[in-house]
Amino acid sequence: MKTRTEHDLLGELPVPAAALYGIHTARALGNFRLSGRAVSPALIRALAQVKKACALANRELGFQTAEKTDAIVRACDEISAGQHADQFPLDALQGGAGTSTNMNLNEVIANRALELLGAARGDYAKLHPIEDVNLHQSTNDVYPTALKVAAISGLRALSAALAALQGAFQRKEKEFSGIVKLGRTEMQDAVPMTLGAEFSAFAEAFARDRWRTFKAEERLRVVNLGGTAIGTGLTAPRSYIFLVIEKLREVTGLGLTRAENLVDGTANADCFVEVAGSLNACATNFIKIARDLRLLHLCGEIKLPAMQAGSSIMPGKVNPVIAEAALQAGMQARAAGALVAEAAAAGTLQINECLPLLAASLLDQLALLQHAAEMLAPHVEGITADADLCRHYLDYSPALITAFLPRLGYEQAQAWLTEYKAGGQTDLRAFLTGKLGKEIVEQTLSPEHLMALGYKK
């Protein structure tokens, strides 16, 4: 393999001649072999957008030539579009608060810009990764800013996926509105309700998650770009600090603003914990609702679409694999949210050294929930109901008589239940019909009456 030699603070190192990255990335490749997973592509794209905004601000203020800026901007646009993905091989977990990832971007942008200028890779006398690409920046303002940009994109994608999932449940709510069934509490028969109402609760839960993701974006719009190393803006011109946020808004199309207190914005990562908390609520809903769908499927009141053979030994077995996968995605997302909080708490003084773990965990959390919603929505669309079985369970359950309490009173209802059981009967609806007449029983157990939110005297 052909190599080129680059140097840094520690000395010289051979770098693959074909690589767009340089010595800083090469050292990090050797140092960090932890998770086996590369830095999130979403974070790489967002970092490229931040770098582009910085370059545009530097050009407008005369700190960088138009020729260099144009090359840097083109390189950033290519990376934002997903090109050169193989040039970002670093492990997601790394020391240095994200410095290695920042330098990876600086080097790839610099070398691609050199190519666009007709120069050789590694010819940093013409365009330098730090002096040009990283001009007026620090990892400590670039990295958390990029993480917020990436997370906002993730929140919007999640919100769209949740909207589709909410819609799927709402359509089933309408389809199942006329199916009367047993409600259950503590895994026991409770009182009559409709299957549509049961699905309405699923829809409302995910509607709240949509609202939470929308509100969570507000927590991420305040960024510390321009604060450089610790939020004081040291080494960056005041004019740049004010302009770079405007450029970032233009590049990203997001309503971003500079933090009033850049020292706070650099030192503290609690905003990410707040977002992760909202996502934990969403993950909790996935777990709970996936479990409920499995139970209803087990009871036979609904039928989940068959997706694949369920066993290597039991012929004909089909498992509720989509619900099970959604349940596990929720568990994993909650664990990722816990890591966000741990990483945020582990920062010391003016920066957070654990931002790589925080970034990986937060972006994982977003992606897991988005993919779970995208997987579950079409599955929900395929759910069917067994109205006859729902009625059978209701008619043969002593819990049915609760619907008649306003007419009978507790003591009379209890007496009738005792009589019903003593007579060895199993169909409570038929028993009550004999006592009250068909019209009263049917009216009392109608979907309209059961879901009327209380009774009229």
Image (spheres, rainbow, N blue to C red):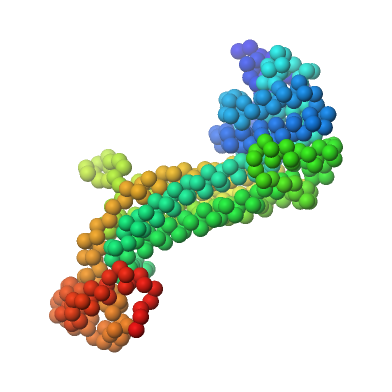
Name the spot of residue 259 as percent of width and height, x first.
75, 49
Report the side of 188 relative to 337 (left or right).
Answer: left
- Residue 57 visible in image: yes
The N terminus: image quadrant: top right
The C terminus: image quadrant: bottom left
Name the spot of residue 403 as percent of width and height, x first.
30, 76
The residue positioned 58% from the left and 29% from the top of the image is: 81
Name the spot of residue 296 as percent of width and height, x first.
32, 58
The residue positioned 30% from the left and 77% from the top of the image is: 402
Image height check: is 422 above or below 314?
below
The residue positioned 27% from the left and 70% from the top of the image is: 446
- Residue 347 visible in image: no
Q: How many labels does the image show?
A: 0
Report the side of 275 relative to 451 (left or right).
Answer: right
The residue lying toward the viewer, choosing from 423 and 430, is 430
Image height check: is 374 above or below 29?
below
The residue positioned 38% from the left and 76% from the top of the image is: 454
The residue lying toward the viewer, choosing from 5 and 453, is 453
Which image quadrant is residue 449 in? bottom left
The residue lying toward the viewer, choosing from 45 and 295, is 45
Name the spot of residue 453 as percent of width and height, x first.
39, 73
Report the side of 393 relative to 205 (left or right).
Answer: left
